[in-house]
């Protein structure tokens, strides 16, 4: 539709019609027999029948046939025949579920995350969707927060690359194209900073920290052209993000140049009342629209009060027009005025969903996202050896994640199924060994989750039943040469509203591990998890530990590939695994303090704990391979650079083992003294190199002024003259360092 036509359309709309365009409801309001998925509280809405019929967008419903039907009925009744927008949380895949985002972060391969997004977009578009509420680009540092699984981790640089790749993957060059959907970056902003990792909690961030660490990934998503942004639930500078004019108008729109559609998170406009920022829903509507929030997700604030606010002269109609214009423009960008069904096509849907290519990509992604934390010669497994699989993830398909709301467990390949294809069944046995959760563990609020068979399948059981499971598994473990133990958090323990104060495995699983260890020390733990866990005891007991996250549809195959050595692991931790929960939040790119604690220093008055070390158990960027690599010292082509000049830093990396392997070569910088203190180390670049046994290759990184720049004391961005350190290695704790000066 041409611009003038769109303006004329806007001009012709009634005030209430405009307010309704700004309302988003769930598909269930359309009383069709639809696949509506509830992803938030659905309290009393107070939305009138008329407004329900006129809402401008729908969330949480998919399926080509269903959405085409809804669209057709809607457009017939909408006074200007404006098409609806269909949105959905396609977080890490539509039906083909890829590894969870934190796992994709571990691949250190943005291009891979982009391909996964593109495949998800194809399936979603064929299912009739126009927008995905993804990627979530929130920076995360606190393993207690359940949503760390949805992020790509603790590093601003890696997150920004991942954000860009995913947005481009979802949208392509032009979101109108077949197989593309609009990306919505979220949650703007600082949601990952929730105090103490408690869900929906206050984020207490200085503006400098906020800008330096948290904003870069959102900015990268905006720069990549994301058509939408979602507000976050938290406050920013004590003002709820969803009604924060400084955040939305000054930072997002003016500074970052975002001109797309801004949507509230689920019921977030109304929640400004509970925050203590708005008196009532009417006040909330006024404050959110003044901040420029275009769509009200699942409350009646906008549909109920915007028209009245304009009529009473409390807000200008131009404010409403501004929002509706952006919504209509998005519909136009997606080509919906010409083709309201876009790519919805039941045939295509069948063809694309879980197609061979997507499954192959999902399997590749699992292989690339597994992180090997420890290996005392156990892996890859010797398939001739008598092997017992013992653990609750041995024979289950519940490995998609809490956020894979469109995925089906039935399409998932379990570890047992995959192992059945490659292991010698004459010498392999499989035992669940234990339920996922402790008998006394209550996941409050999950009782009713039956829509995906997601209730802890264990239901009721007693001590005797537990003992029987243990005994049988332990006996098998005692008879085996190798025990592979697929343990982990239940997939219901991470994701939205899944904060945990203790980040250990359920006691019942630890008990099994100890009992197995008493009869057989040759243990390989395969760890399923949505977050970094406290792995101290596991690391001590097991002779190998492989983190496989929530791996998705092809989980079984991807993990078996790594266990058998078909794939040599190359994943690196995108988030530190703390020594204990007491360190949280912990990250590698922190500040030094005036009394940094040095290893082995017994002096009392240093920044440290009395009972645990400062360092995480496994740091950011860490991950082993089945082969070994050596790094030469860091070679710099010059020792000084001005603002206009560059330095090339090089290392020679050699595969010194006997298998082909891939290493993530990482470049870190430190500005040793500056007008404001700078992090002890920051990731500035990385490269993945694959080397044959004995092969050596030089890896070079260009250091330019941008890599040295930061927000200086006076608020300007740039570098400062002085000493810099540069590390190149295979982990954030590398000590392979050189120095140079910015003159
Ligand atoms: C709430 C979540 O915070 C958000 O990420 C999601 O997109 C919406 N619900 C819609 O499901």
Image: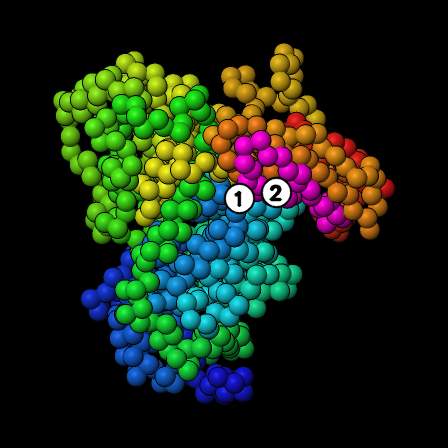
Q: Nearer the viewer, residue 142 or 111?
A: 111
Which mark is drawn over residue 528? none
Is the Cβ of the residue at disc 1 closer than 8 Å to that at disc 2? Answer: yes
Which mark is drawn over residue 108? 1
**Picture residue at 57% right of the left edge, 41% below the top:** 689
Crowd band around label 1 with a 10 angstrom C-alpha radius: few (<14), some (14–19), many (20+) = many
Ligand 1 has an atom within 8 Å of the beta carbon of the residue at disc 2: no
**N-terminal-most mark, 1 or 2:** 1
Relative to residue 356, is residue 460 drawn left or right? left
Instruction: Find residue 370 and report its horizontal and vertical position in percent.
Output: 43, 38
Question: Is residue 661 one of those drawn in magenta?
Answer: no
The number of callouts visible is 2
Instruction: Find residue 359 and report its horizontal and vertical position in percent.
Output: 35, 52
Magenta span covers which residues?
683-710
Secondary element type, mark 1: loop
Instruction: Find residue 207 and report its horizontal and vertical position in percent.
Output: 63, 47
The answer to whether residue 376 of the structure is visible from this angle is yes
């Amino acid at each position: 539709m041409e611009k003038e036509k769109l303006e004329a359309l806007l001009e012709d709309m009634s005030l209430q019609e405009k307010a309704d365009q700004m309302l988003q409801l769930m598909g269930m309001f359309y009383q069709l027999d639809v696949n509506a998925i509830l992803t938030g509280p659905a309290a009393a809405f107070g939305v009138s029948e008329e407004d329900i019929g006129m809402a401008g967008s729908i969330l949480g419903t998919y399926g080509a046939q269903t959405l085409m039907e809804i669209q057709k009925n809607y457009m017939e009744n909408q006074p200007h025949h404006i098409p609806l927008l269909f949105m959905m949380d396609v977080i890490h895949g539509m039906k083909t579920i890829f590894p969870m985002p934190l796992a994709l972060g571990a691949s250190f391969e943005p291009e891979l995350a982009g391909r996964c997004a593109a495949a998800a977009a194809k399936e979603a578009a064929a299912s009739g969707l126009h927008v995905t509420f993804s990627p979530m680009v929130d920076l995360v540092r606190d393993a207690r927060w359940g949503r760390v699984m949805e992020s790509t981790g603790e590093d601003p640089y890696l997150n920004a690359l991942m954000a860009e790749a995913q947005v481009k993957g979802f949208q392509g060059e032009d979101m109108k194209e077949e197989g593309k959907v609009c990306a919505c970056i979220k949650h703007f902003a600082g949601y990952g900073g929730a105090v103490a990792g408690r869900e929906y909690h206050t984020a207490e961030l200085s503006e400098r920290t906020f800008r330096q660490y948290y904003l870069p990934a959102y900015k990268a998503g905006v720069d990549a052209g994301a058509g939408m942004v979602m507000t976050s639930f938290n406050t920013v500078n004590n003002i709820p993000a969803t009604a924060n004019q400084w955040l939305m108008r000054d930072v997002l729109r003016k500074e970052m140049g975002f001109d797309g559609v801004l949507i509230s998170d689920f019921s977030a406009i109304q929640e400004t009342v509970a925050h203590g920022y708005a008196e009532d829903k009417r006040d909330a509507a006024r404050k959110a629209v003044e901040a420029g929030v275009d769509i009200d997700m699942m409350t009646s604030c906008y549909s109920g009060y915007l028209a009245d606010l304009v009529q009473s002269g409390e807000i200008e109609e131009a404010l409403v027009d501004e929002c509706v214009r952006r919504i209509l423009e998005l519909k136009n960008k997606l080509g919906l005025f010409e083709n309201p069904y876009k790519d919805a096509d039941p045939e295509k849907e069948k063809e694309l969903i879980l197609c061979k290519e997507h499954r192959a990509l999902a399997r590749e992604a699992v292989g690339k996202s597994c992180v090997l934390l420890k290996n005392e010669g156990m892996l890859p497994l010797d398939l001739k050896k008598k092997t017992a699989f013992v653990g609750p993830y041995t024979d289950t398909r519940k490995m998609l994640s809490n956020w894979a709301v469109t995925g089906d467990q039935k399409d998932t390949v379990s570890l047992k199924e995959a192992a059945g294809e490659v292991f010698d069944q004459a010498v392999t046995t499989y035992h669940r060994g234990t339920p996922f959760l402790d008998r006394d563990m209550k996941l409050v609020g999950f009782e009713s989750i039956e829509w995906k068979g997601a209730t802890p399948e264990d239901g009721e059981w007693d001590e005797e039943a537990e003992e029987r499971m243990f005994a049988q598994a332990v006996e098998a473990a005692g008879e085996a040469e190798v025990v592979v133990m697929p343990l982990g958090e239940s997939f219901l323990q991470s994701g939205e509203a899944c904060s945990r104060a203790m980040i250990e495995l359920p006691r019942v699983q630890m008990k099994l591990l100890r009992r197995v260890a008493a009869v057989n020390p040759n243990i390989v733990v395969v760890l399923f998890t949505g977050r970094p866990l406290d792995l101290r005891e596991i690391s001590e007991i097991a002779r190998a530990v492989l983190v496989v996250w929530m791996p998705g549809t092809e989980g079984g195959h991807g993990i078996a590939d790594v266990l058998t050595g078909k794939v040599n692991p190359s994943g690196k931790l995108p988030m530190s695994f703390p020594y204990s929960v007491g360190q949280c939040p912990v990250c590698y790119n922190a500040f030094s303090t005036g009394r940094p604690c040095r290893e082995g220093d017994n002096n009392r008055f240093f920044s440290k704990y009395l009972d645990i070390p400062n360092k995480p158990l496994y740091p950011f960027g860490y991950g082993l391979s089945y082969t070994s690599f050596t790094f030469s010292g860091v070679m710099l082509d010059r020792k000084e650079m001005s603002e206009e000049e560059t330095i090339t830093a090089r290392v020679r990396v050699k595969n010194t083992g006997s298998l082909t392997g891939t290493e993530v070569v990482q470049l870190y910088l430190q500005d040793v003294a500056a007008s404001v203190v700078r992090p002890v180390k920051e990731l500035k670049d990385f490269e993945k190199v694959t080397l044959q046994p004995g092969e050596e290759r030089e890896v070079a990184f260009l250091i330019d002024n941008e890599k040295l720049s930061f927000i200086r004391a006076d608020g300007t961005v740039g570098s400062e003259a002085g000493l810099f350190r540069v590390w190149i290695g295979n982990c954030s704790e590398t000590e392979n360092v050189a120095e140079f000066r910015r003159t």
